[in-house]
Amino acid sequence: MPDLAWWEILVRLAAAAALGGIIGIERELREREAGFRTHLLVSVGAALFTLVSAYAWSDFAFSQASGVTIDPTRIAAQIVTGIGFLGAGAIIRQGLTVRGLTTAATLWMVAAIGMACGAGFYWAAVIATAIALVSLWPLRIVSRRLFERPHRRELEVDLRQDRPAAPVLAALEQLGIGIASFSIGVRGDGRRLVCAVELPHGAGSEDVVLRLGELDEVSGVRWVK
């Protein structure tokens, strides 16, 4: 079994820290939940697991004759599935929106980069880091311009007593606003309509409030999220 000098171990762990930290800085600048330190630790941890898996058993005797064999990828393979638990913790649901998917993907990515550094596959780690940075910054701008999606928000409309909600829904459709879902609940002297709407880019939220406020059926309008 091959053995590594201490300086080579240092180089591999330092490379994992540097490349994982670079991606973490980008997440830190965007004030994401998992930032610089988290990505650095994930990358270094993955590199260390890979080193342990492949090189930490030189003092043990393995041979086909004795029936004791070694699989250098066995420990490292668990990184791929284990990192999913940490990635799931970075995903947060806030009302109708889900945040943290990209951060979870970058954690998964830096784990792979750390494994590559631990195995001494430096060029693959550097290229993967470059691709990750391009996808997080330039491609983000391009995708937003090419695939603009309506912004989903939640709207609360107070209805006067015994007044229907149909005119409110019709007014929203006239404004070109998609209605993802809605529910009607009872409040003090009337009812409350809660709508999950898709606000097109360029549409003014204040215009929606003013338009609905002109309806006789409505006593109050507010954006919740």
Image (cartoon, rainbow, N blue to C red):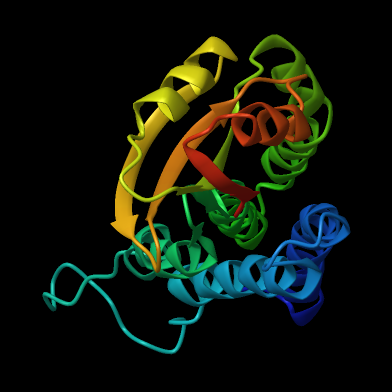
Q: Which of 127 and 200 is in front in this view?
A: 200
Q: Provide residue 61's location: percent of width, then percent of height.
A: 31, 84
Q: Which residue is drawn at 75% across and 43% down?
A: 129
43 relative to 117, above or below: below
User: Which of the 4 image quarters holds residue 5?
Assistant: bottom right
Q: For this rendering, which residue is in front, 65 or 68?
A: 68
In this rendering, does residue 63 appear at all?
yes
Query: Is the residue 41 above or below the residue 79 in the image?
Result: below
- Residue, x 44% and y 89% (percent of image)? 59
183 left or right of 13? left
Q: In this view, does 214 lie to the left or right of 80?
A: right
Q: Which of 38 and 196 is in front in this view?
A: 196
Whether residue 2 is visible here, answered yes or no, is no
Residue 164 location (% of width, % of height): 32, 35
Could you tell whether 47 is left or right of 206 in the image?
Answer: left
- On the rendered structure, is 86 left or right of 111? left
Residue 12 on image: x %, y %:
74, 65
Which residue is painted at 73% across and 47% down in the image?
Answer: 122
Total numbered badges shown on the rendered structure = 0
**Residue 85 or residue 90, whichever sits in front:** 90
Q: Is residue 210 depicted above or below 2 in this figure?
A: above
Residue at 74% x, 69% y: name it: 40
Q: Where is residue 77 in the image (x, y as percent from the top left)?
A: 36, 60
